Image: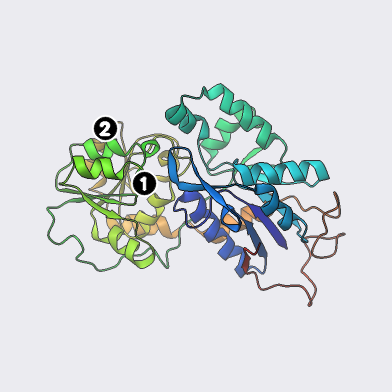
Amino acid sequence: MRILLATDAWSPQVNGVVRTWQQTIRELAAMGHEVEVVHPSLGRTVAAPRYKEIRLALAPWAIVGRAMERPFDALHIATEGPIGLEARRRAMSRGIPFTTSYHTQFPEYLKQYFGMPRRITWRFMRWFHGGGRATLAPTQRVTDQLRANGIVRATTWCRGVDTNLFRPIASDLFAGLPRPIHLYAGRVAREKNIDAFIEARLPGSKVVVGDGPERARLERAHPEIVFAGYRFGDELAAHYAAADLFVFPSRTDTFGIVMLEANACGLPVAAYPVTGPVDVVREGVNGALDEDLAVAAERALQVPRESCLAYARSQSWSRVAEVLLGHLAPIGSVGGATPSQDPKNPLARPSSDTNTRGVVSTRP
């Protein structure tokens, strides 16, 4: 199957949306499927308002138009930005079925950053996702939230962790710091509620892995905290493994893949009992939840690292890919789009002269 993925979030952005799709695409490739990613960097971009790290496509019609003229078997729209909007417009006008996914709590973020009333954002969300055959949400709680706000085709998608990459690694990275080491990894941004971590009365030391619009301010105000910047791959895993506890202060994430990554490195998680953490953290198994982060941290530090490892190893990215495939809407031969294989059976294995390498295509 050849899948067209339209997303406004892609490399070089560093976030859970990008990480989810990169891992899912790897699994799809291993299954023999090909994914073409349609993303902003295929054309000129402009910085998002108040968030220069996020780049938005200036001419999404050109980027999406080129991609949709090539054969594909299924269309998935991952984000509600310019790329996603253009893909939706073209699909609706040509009668091409598509699916969507909900990764970001935009009603909460737009309220925080711009004072946008949530009811207006939810009205847009209902319109955007309402045209799809299914809207994939990361947890049952988010699925219920979407349905309660009128997105009736919402269904639960799962998440996973790469336990080959994220694993216990012997490291003395924080050898000179007072213990316990409390670590945060993610965007250093207002919507992540990072100030709650910074201000929490925690013993030992605090380390922030990541970057974002709030870093400069926080680094000036808190010289006692280690700001390590972005870390990737083995280096990121080593930072997790060298710490004693992972603190996840966000109240607005739909999931929080970093919590599973921390668990896979043997790190328990302390978080608030809100959407995202409640679907990941099992009290006494891989962390603790409490409305007081310091209380959650104290309990989480008692969780054995081996228990965290066992929990993480039960979460598979292959299952994530399988669930996605089960919800995609094959296009057949409708709307003028040309399927890349037999239109009578678009889910069949491609013939020998079809590209079956499963590589990710990002060509313009």
Q: Is residue 206 left or right of residue 129?
A: left
Q: Which mark is residue 212?
A: 1
Q: Are marks 1 and 2 in contact (CB under 8 Å)?
A: no
Considering only vertical position in the picture, is 315 above or below 254? Answer: below
- First of labels 1, 2 by sequence position: 1
Report the residue that reaches farthest toward the bottom: 352
Badge 2: residue crowd in 10 Å (few <14, some 14–19, many ≥20):
some
Considering only vertical position in the picture, is 95 above or below 20? Answer: above
Front-lying residue, 8 or 307: 8
Taking the image as drawn, is residue 148 in sight?
no
Task: Name the kind of residue labelled 1 in the image.
Answer: Gly
Front-lying residue, 37 or 180: 37
Residue 271: give x, y in percent of width and height: 33, 40
Taking the image as drawn, is residue 349 in sight?
yes
Residue 50: give x, y in percent of width and height: 43, 38
The residue at which mark 2 appears reads as 292
